[in-house]
Image (cartoon, rainbow, N blue to C red):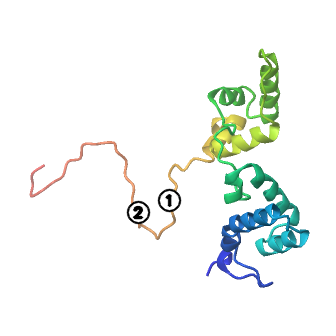
Amino acid sequence: MEDGDAVRAGGGLPAASRTALRGPAVRRLLALRAGKKLTAGHVRVAADALGVSERTVWRWLAAAQSDETAAAYPGARSRVDARFTVTPEVRGLLALWKGNVRAVHRELVLRAARQCPPADAPSLTTLHRAIRRDLTPGERAGLAGGERAARKHDVFLARPRGWRNQVWETDHVQSPVLVNVDGKA
């Protein structure tokens, strides 16, 4: 049994069950609110059973008032595809500034301010998150330290260790070799 499936020491539910019960709990609390019977005690009990703070349950209830999806899946992150991603422009700026994310951010803010009407630039935290998510460690090292730094992240000739003579490698270069078979070349 994995740790997420185990019953907690305090007698609580496993994490998967707590997550699955969020929607029914929020819908029940909304029904109590509609009947003017919702109390802080109800929220406290729900928060304890779900393993979250009371403030979180109140926030879920506020979101569920205006959005049915939030009532069905409270606490779930929105699946909006409007998140910031690393574009070729950002890659070019990273190469120009040798991987300095702060300098790239300053440049993006300046470019956004020059547009008419002024556009929004991503925050520094958003830019860091997108770079960590969209670029491999080798790409980030290559932008900051050049080709030699990027090669440290290559998997060239990487192979799990085995016993002696388990694997033999040969070169692909062809060389003429004369073999003597029964006196004939």
Residue at the disc numbered 1 = 159
Q: Residues within 10 Å of mark 2 (few under 14, many from 20)?
A: few
What secondary structure is found at the residue carrying circle 2? loop
Q: Residues under labels 1 and 2: Cα distance?
A: 10 Å
Q: Does the CB distance between marks 1 and 2 fall below 8 Å?
A: yes
Where does residue 132 sit, x and y in percent of width and height?
Answer: 70, 45
In the displayed structure, 173 sits above or below 104; it is below
Q: Count the numbered circles shown.
A: 2
Q: In this orientation, which residue lies closer to the viewer: 171 or 143?
A: 143
Q: In this orientation, which residue lies closer to the viewer: 23 or 173?
A: 23
Question: What number is the disc on residue 146?
Answer: none
What secondary structure is found at the residue carrying circle 1? loop
Horizontal side, residue 37 vs residue 180: left or right: right
Where does residue 89 sit, x and y in percent of width and height?
Answer: 66, 26
- Is residue 73 shown to the viewer in this render? no
| Disc 2 residue type (three-letter) | Val
